[in-house]
């Protein structure tokens, strides 16, 4: 029996975490929510998630800094970034570092699910 993919949700906004977790579960995946990149790094050791949905703007460690730490540790997790402050510079930077998608907030559930399914299938957006 195939293991249900685990999707990590890393966002400092509790409402966003809850709504993304609900969306992820609605399509049959397991959601694990973290309130910060530090929280993820501290708690998520061992089995990496199949994919991550992360905010860019977070205190202490930003989403792109979290991505850089994971890459430096050899942990290549497909990441879908979401931000309320999209910029072309940031988009280019995180995609060049291996992010799967870069979405503005708010994004439609359909768009998030499309990125998630492509990331899990190993497809390039």
Image: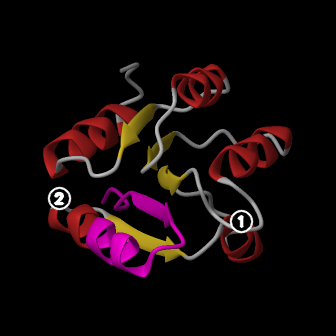
Measured as percent of width and height from the top left, residue 66 is found at: 72, 52
Number of other residues with Cα within 10 Å of mark 1, as a class: few under 14, some 14 to 19, many 20 or more: few
Tell me the CA gap for discs 2 and 1.
25 Å
36 is higher (above) or lower (below) than 96: below
In front here: 17 or 117?
A: 17
- Residue at image position (77%, 67%) is 60
- Residue at image position (69%, 77%) is 43
- Residue at image position (60%, 31%) is 90
The residue indicated by pointer 1 is 46
The residue indicated by pointer 2 is 27
Which span of residues is magenta-colored?
A: 1-21
Q: Is residue 69 magenta?
A: no
Relative to 29, is 64 on the left or the right? right
Q: The C terminus lies in which quarter of the figure?
A: top left
Helix, strand or loop for disc 2: loop
Q: Is residue 2 magenta?
A: yes
């Amino acid at each position: 029996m195939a293991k249900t993919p685990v999707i990590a949700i890393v966002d400092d906004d509790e409402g966003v975490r809850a709504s993304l977790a609900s969306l992820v579960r609605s399509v049959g995946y397991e959601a694990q929510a973290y309130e910060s990149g530090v929280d993820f790094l501290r708690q998520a050791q061992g089995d990496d998630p199949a994919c991550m949905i992360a905010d860019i703007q977070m205190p202490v460690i930003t989403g792109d800094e979290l991505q850089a730490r994971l890459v430096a540790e050899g942990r290549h997790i497909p990441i879908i970034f979401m931000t309320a402050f999209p910029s072309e510079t940031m988009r280019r930077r995180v995609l060049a570092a291996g992010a799967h998608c870069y979405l503005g907030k708010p994004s439609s559930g359909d768009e998030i699910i499309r990125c998630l399914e492509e990331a899990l299938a190993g497809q390039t957006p």
